Image (spheres, helix red, strand yellow):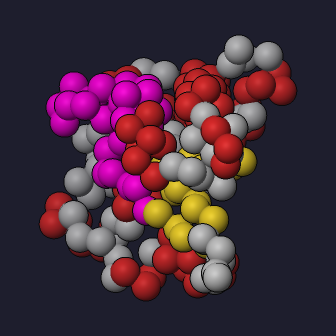
Amino acid sequence: MTADPKTVLCFGDSLTWGYDPRSGDKMLRYPFAERWTRRLQVELGEAYQVIEDGLSGRTTAFDDPVVGAMNSTVQLPTSLATHMPLGLVVIMLGTNDAKTFFGVNGDVIARCLGRLLDIVVKAGCGPDGKAPKMLVVVPPMMGDVSGTILEPLFDPVHSRDAIARLRESYPPHRRGLCR
């Protein structure tokens, strides 16, 4: 009898969803095999099941005033319960939190990521009702969005500074910020 594969939940925004920036406002995805979640599946092999739960515009803890409910503190519990038991939860969020209208810095985004980890721990969605292993992937530095559909949403100075600060300040629990 073959053992069930270990389940890896990849929870994130458009980077996890597979948004292809070359598609502009058409909001097209990279082909299935090119997405990082599919490449992860190939690398891990049949002993693992990688679940891609990406949503363009998703934030750590904020509702988007234009798009609506993108708040992971609301969405994550449902995803955890849907796919349990989970061996690993990968969270890749923070880019959308750097949108100009949220006005938050990287330290706030880091605390919000810490809050999501607390949700995972309390959900008991791992093997035997315990917490699964967790991995936070801090978003890559933001490139130039001038002339793209993203330009009105991201201030070239504030948004890049917020992501840069997030990359410096995460993980917040080591600095006593998220508890």
Percent x, y for residue 17? 37, 61
- In the displayed structure image, the side of residue 64 where residue 78 appears, left or right: right
User: What percent of the width, then of the height, locates residue 107?
Assistant: 64, 24
Question: Dividing the image into 4 quarters, which one contains the C terminus?
Answer: top right
Task: Mark yes or no: residue 40 visible.
Answer: no
The residue range painted magenta reads 52-76
Residue under the image location 27 percent in, 58 percent down? 148
In reply to whether residue 84 is colored magenta, the answer given is: no
* Residue 147: % across, % down: 26, 57
Foreground of the two, 75 or 66: 75
Q: Is residue 155 above or below residue 90?
A: above
Instruction: Give the residue at x 83% y 27%.
Output: 174
Residue depicted at x 30% and y 71%: 29
Q: Is residue 74 magenta?
A: yes
Question: Against 109, is 28 above or below?
Answer: below
Residue 76 vs residue 14, the one in the foreground: 76
- Quarter of the image for the N terminus: give it: bottom right
Which residue ends up furthest to the front in the rendered image? 1
Closer-to-camera residue (101/11): 11
Against 151, is 33 above or below? below
Residue 102: x %, y % from top left? 38, 23
